[in-house]
């Protein structure tokens, strides 16, 4: 959804098609790096052993005999992502925050015509003396080479806005949603993006895009190489 807002009509059609006709098997790029960062932040002691272990696993994976070029490249990029995060950890200010890993299956955001999967990597909590805790979330973004582009920054801020919307509607039991704790972390640039302003304009754009997707959903044709189950 964060990409769909600013995408060209051609790219929007591709996003709708891929959502309606997902491939039978999709291997997530940077999954090892994501898991390593989650394990590190979820540990209150912030032991660097988590990052070292994740790096060592990827070095072994990269050097395993017979693995594909894709696996080698993913392993190398995952190592670079972990190293980039470790370099920027102090400047991100994460040492002062409490993080909590969440279940793999999280509920969809269902406030617009189209259900939106947000999938927080971590819950963020700022505990207050008066008991009125603040809450937010983290999503790690991995895109080497695009981190400083205007398009990438805008997309990251939209992801942060989705996190704020998600926490406002579904994480109230943990505390009040705080925009400052809703972080789209661009790992390679070492920047944690927060929502733009109140995000009311962004939320309105997402509602419009959601209606557009819902209206065009049944008219979206499958790709020529679609190998999944029949879709009515």
Image: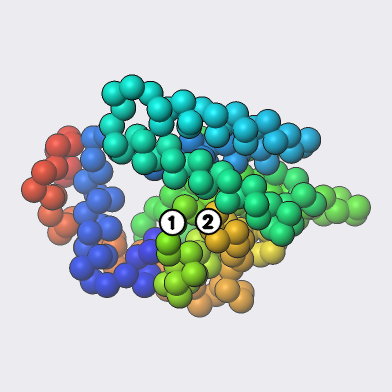
Q: What is the C-alpha distance between the residues marked 1 and 2?
A: 7 Å
Q: Secondary structure at mark 1?
A: loop
Q: Residue at the location (44% across, 45% down)?
A: 77
Tell whether label 2 touches label 1 (CB within 8 Å). Answer: yes
Choose top left, top right, bottom left or bottom right for residue 144. bottom left
Q: Who's the residue at 91% across and 52% down the image? A: 129
Q: Does 120 appear above or below 180?
A: above
Crowding around mark 1 (Cα neighbors within 10 Å: few <14, some 14 to 19, many 20+) is some
Counting labels gives 2
Q: Position of residue 84 (x, y in %)?
A: 58, 51
Q: Up-down: is 104 above or below 154? A: above
Taking the view exactly as shown, the residue that stands out farthest to the left is 224
The numbered mark, 1 or 2, whose residue comes first in the sequence reads 1
Closer to the camera in the image, 43 or 169: 43
Image-quadrant location for residue 10: bottom left
The answer to whether residue 59 shows anywhere in this view is yes
- Coordinates of residue 54 in the picture (x, y in percent): 56, 32
Image quadrant where one finds the C terminus: top left
Establish if 99 lies above or below 178: above
Residue at 60% in and 41% down = 37
Q: Nearer the viewer, residue 212 or 194?
A: 194
Residue drawn 68% across the image and 31% down it? 49
Q: Which residue is mark 1?
A: 143
| Circle 2: element type | loop
Pick out the residue farthest to the top: 65
> Residue 188 shows which numbered tag?
2
Q: Residues within 10 Å of mark 2 (few under 14, many from 20)?
A: many
Q: Can residue 175 be spotted in the picture?
A: no
């Amino acid at each position: 959804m964060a990409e769909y807002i600013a995408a060209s009509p051609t790219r929007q059609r591709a996003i709708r098609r891929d959502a309606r006709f997902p491939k039978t098997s999709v291997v997530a790029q940077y999954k090892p790096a994501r898991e390593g960062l989650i394990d590190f932040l979820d540990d209150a002691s912030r032991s660097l052993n988590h990052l070292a272990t994740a790096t060592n696993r990827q070095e072994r994976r990269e050097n395993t005999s017979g693995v594909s070029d894709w696996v080698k490249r993913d392993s190398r990029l995952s190592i670079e992502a972990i190293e980039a995060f470790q370099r920027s950890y102090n400047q991100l200010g994460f040492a002062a925050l409490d993080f909590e890993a969440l279940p793999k299956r999280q509920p969809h955001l269902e406030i617009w015509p189209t259900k939106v999967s947000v999938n927080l990597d971590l819950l963020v909590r700022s505990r207050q003396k008066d008991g009125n805790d603040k809450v937010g979330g983290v999503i790690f973004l991995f895109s080497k080479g695009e981190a400083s582009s205007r398009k990438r920054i805008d997309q990251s801020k939209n992801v942060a806005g989705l996190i704020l919307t998600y926490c406002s509607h579904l994480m109230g039991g943990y505390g009040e949603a705080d925009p400052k704790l809703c972080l789209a972390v661009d790992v390679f640039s070492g920047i944690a993006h927060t929502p733009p302003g109140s995000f009311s304009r962004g939320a309105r754009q997402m509602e419009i895009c959601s209606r557009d997707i819902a209206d065009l959903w049944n008219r979206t044709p499958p790709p020529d190489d679609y190998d999944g189950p029949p879709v009515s």
